[in-house]
Each structure stands twice: as C-alpha cells, then as structure tokens.
Image (cartoon, rainbow, N blue to C red):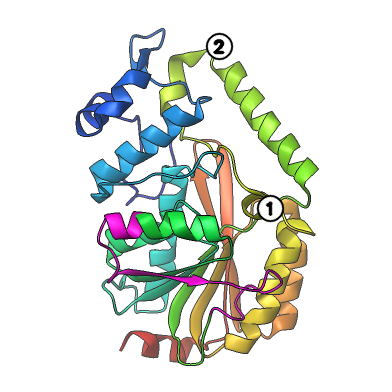
Amino acid sequence: MSKLHPRNPHSGRYDLAALSKTTPALSSFLKKNPKGDNTIDFADPVAVKTLNAALLKQHYQIGFWDIPKDYLCPPIPGRADYIHYLADLLASSNNGNIPEGKQVHGLDIGTGANLIYPLLATKSYGWKMTGSEIEPSSLASANAILKANRLEKSIQLVKQDNKNQILKGVIKGSDQYHFTLCNPPFHSSAKEAAQGSNRKLNNLKKGSENTSNISKKPALNFGGQHNELWCKGGERAFIKQMIKESADYKTQCLWFTSLVAKKDNLPAIKQALKKSGAVFFKEIKMAQGNKISRFIAWTFQPKDQQLNWFS
C-alpha cells in the first residue's frame, strides 16, 4: 500500500489509459499484465521518460518536458513527496499554515537537466524557484523546459562556476530564500555508481517476470551523468560541505534541506549539524510502499523569528 504524502496526487495505480489520451506517445509502450491491467516496462528508460512527460502534462500542465539521452530520469511520485513535506516544514514556521505564492522563494541545488523540483514546486504551490547547476548541457536542457512552458517569471536558473562550491557563488548578497532542497550525488565513485545502476536494472528485470503489480511501482531513475550520480566522498561529504557553507548564509535562508539516500550517513551528518551552530535540525521521513526515504532539514533561525519570514 502506498504511503505517499496525503497531498501527493500520485497515490495508487497510474491511470495509463487516461495518461495515453493526453500524451498519445505513451500508448505505444502499454501492455497487459497477467491480470489484464495496463502497464509499461519500467526497465525501459524511454517508456519511463514518456510516462514522466505524461504525468507532468496531466497533473501539472507541463506541455513540454524532455531530457537528453543518458541523463537522470526522476521518479515523479517521490520528487513530489519531497515538495509536499517541504510545504509542511514551512507551515511549521508559519503558525501551521502552508505559505503559497511567489512570496515564497526556494533554491534547488543541482537542478539537473530535468528541472523537476522547480516544476513541481511552482505548479503545486505557486512558489518562486531558483535552480543552480554546474553542467552547461544540463543548464541548457533545464532552460529549454522552462522557456517552452513560459515559466520564466516563476523559475530562474543560476550557473555554479566552481565545482568545489555548493552554496557559495549561488546565493548572492541580497538573496533571501525560504528553503533549499537538494538531491545530492550519493555515490563516491563512478564504479560505485555503475554497480548501483546495474543492481537497480537487474531488480527491475527480475520483477518483470511477475508483472501483476509493476504498474503500481513508481518510475525509477535511469541514466545519469557523473555529476548527478557521484562525487568524491559521496553524499556524506557533499552534505557535510553544504552544512559548513550554510553557516555563512544563516540570515539568508530559513530552512536548508537535502535528501539523504543512505541511512548510515545520518550519524555523521547530524554530528556536523551539532557543530554548525544550527538552532534546530530534524530528519523528515517519506515512504513509497515499502521504501523509506528521508531528508534532513536545519535552520539557524530561532522559533520566535521564523514567522517573520512570512509577514
């Protein structure tokens, strides 16, 4: 049983017939499972990408969405969950009320070629979003998506020129952000990333032998460039550096957050947060079926000052 956030529109089975009507290209990937229900081959990256485009069109009015070959193809349900739990986090600083509209400004660190978080955030809550990116080709792809959907007034892109920096060079002197979000590269090497991708693909192929429930599974990531999948030290080193840099912007951002893919990294990350001077930090868990994911959130703003961000 799906345990997606209550506001997540992707709970339950995909209505592939309805999705195929809004995105006819999806119909060529449909097939029947043993129960006679529509499904697709989730081990086929082109099918998954087409499904994503259909979901974005039907639920978020995104008319054009595409990514270059071999770039990261994000699972829409899980990405949407992060956005909805972020909304709850902001509400905890705003007397329990979810703030909406362009007065709320979020920063997506490493937005990627797919631009997925800014798209979901601005379409779900009307937030203004900035996406930072270091890879020129990813930046070009993200820019093409936002321009094709005429979202220039809601989403802007910033190039990170220094591969050794995360927030520095992106957050400028006058910038104010209500939150950051990030899906950091979680592998520590190209070899580890390749092994992880192979395991994922093999598991999907094994699962296709019993396809009775495959249409309930969220689309998994396929492909991915080196900066999307791995960095020296993996996600632990990346998030620890982000925590260190965040202390320099404590008055310019209410909540800093990042996904943490590996539970074993949490103790080191929480220890770094204790040393950072953060006033509060919390682990926020999310679930998709039997899969548990999480993001870590921290702030340098005392509770009595957090409401000022929304006045």
Residue 67: name its quadrant.
Answer: top left
> In the picture, which quadrant includes the C terminus?
bottom left
Q: Residue at x 52, y 87 (%)?
A: 301
Does residue 1 lie above or below 65 as drawn? Answer: above
* Residue 31 visible within the image: yes
Q: Which residue is mark 2?
A: 209
Q: Residues within 10 Å of mark 2 (few under 14, many from 20)?
A: few
- The residue range painted magenta reads 145-170
Q: Nearer the viewer, residue 21 or 16?
A: 21
Pick the front one: 90 or 151: 151
- Residue 158 belongs to magenta span: yes
- Above-or-below relation of 15 to 296: above
* Residue drawn at point x = 75 percent, y = 35 percent: 195
Q: Secondary structure at mark 1?
A: loop
Foreground of the two, 96 or 137: 137
Mark 1 sits on what residue? 186
- Residue 1 seen in the current view: no
